[in-house]
Image (spheres, rainbow, N blue to C red):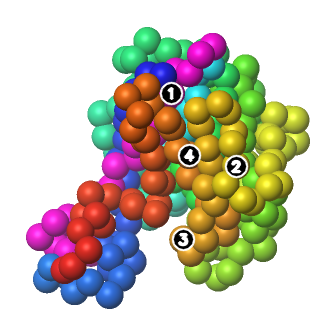
């Protein structure tokens, strides 16, 4: 099993929303806000080479958004999902599986793109995409806090194209021989967190938004 960090760029979100009850005077030292209270966040995905599979975990936000969206979230950076994959020696056609931790736009936006005539199509033409039924249903009827994070153009084309596999077992799930899935609630409904059993006996866990940044690791503030 081999792991590659995939840098899908940067974007901005409100620092207060990201740090909650932690006072700004504290979190601002860790991730300084701009004049609009917006902090910069990395869009980091994970590529896993496992046996004959190349598994991409999350896809960033993609690049199909309009100017209004961009004015809210300010996507930027020197790289994106596809160029970062290319730097590691992979093309979109190489990917066999796309594991979607959850369907907020900054995690699934890169899963779908516009083709040359403007149709929405899967970015990875040879891949099966993985989510779960409970979360997929939630994406269509979320609470008000989450509503703006679910953009149907990011995942409905996957279902309509027949490439989206929806799991329906919410105990700890053995996805492949050395890959398990845990289901977590709070940030969103039934977020999927993959656990990889490495050859040295340790585990690598892709935390998604259970742990959105290194600034969230520390327990006391």
Q: Earlier in the sequence, mark 4 or mark 2?
A: 2
Q: Earlier in the sequence, mark 1 or mark 2?
A: 1
Q: Residue under label 2, please give it.
A: 173
Q: Circles 3 and 1: CB distance less than 8 Å? A: no
* Nearer-the-camera pick, 200 or 34: 200
Within 10 Å of disc 1 (Cα), the crowding (few <14, some 14-19, many 20+) is: some
Lateral position of residue 133 relative to residue 147, left or right: right
Percent across and percent down for residue 55 are: 58, 28
Which callout, 3 or 1, points to the residue nearer the camera?
1
Where are the magenta residues, as a range?
27-52
Q: Residue under label 1, please give it.
A: 48
Lateral position of residue 128 relative to residue 51, left or right: right
Is-magenta flag for residue 77?
no
Q: Earlier in the sequence, mark 2 or mark 3?
A: 2
Q: Circles 2 and 3: CB distance less than 8 Å? A: no
Q: Earlier in the sequence, mark 3 or mark 1?
A: 1
Q: Residue under label 3, please give it.
A: 187
Mark number for residue 159? none
Asked if residue 70 can be seen in this view, the reply is: no
């Amino acid at each position: 099993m081999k792991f590659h960090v995939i840098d899908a760029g940067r974007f901005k979100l409100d620092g207060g929303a990201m740090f909650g009850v932690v006072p700004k005077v504290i979190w601002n030292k860790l991730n300084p806000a701009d004049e609009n209270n917006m902090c910069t966040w990395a869009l980091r995905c994970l590529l896993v080479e496992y046996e004959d599979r190349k598994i991409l975990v999350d896809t960033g936000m993609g690049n199909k958004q309009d100017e209004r969206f961009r004015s809210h979230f300010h996507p930027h950076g020197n790289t994106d999902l596809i160029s970062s994959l290319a730097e590691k020696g992979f093309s979109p056609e190489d990917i066999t599986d796309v594991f979607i931790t959850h369907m907020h736009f900054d995690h699934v936006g890169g899963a779908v793109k516009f083709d040359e005539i403007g149709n929405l199509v899967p970015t990875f033409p040879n891949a099966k995409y993985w989510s779960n039924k409970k979360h997929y249903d939630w994406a269509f009827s979320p609470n008000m806090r989450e509503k703006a994070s679910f953009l149907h153009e990011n995942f409905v084309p996957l279902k309509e194209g027949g490439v989206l596999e929806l799991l329906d077992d919410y105990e700890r799930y053995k996805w492949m021989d050395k890959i398990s899935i845990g289901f977590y609630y709070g940030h969103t409904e039934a977020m999927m967190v993959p656990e990889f059993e490495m050859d040295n006996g340790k585990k690598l866990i892709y935390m998604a938004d259970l742990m959105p940044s290194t600034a969230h690791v520390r327990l006391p503030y």
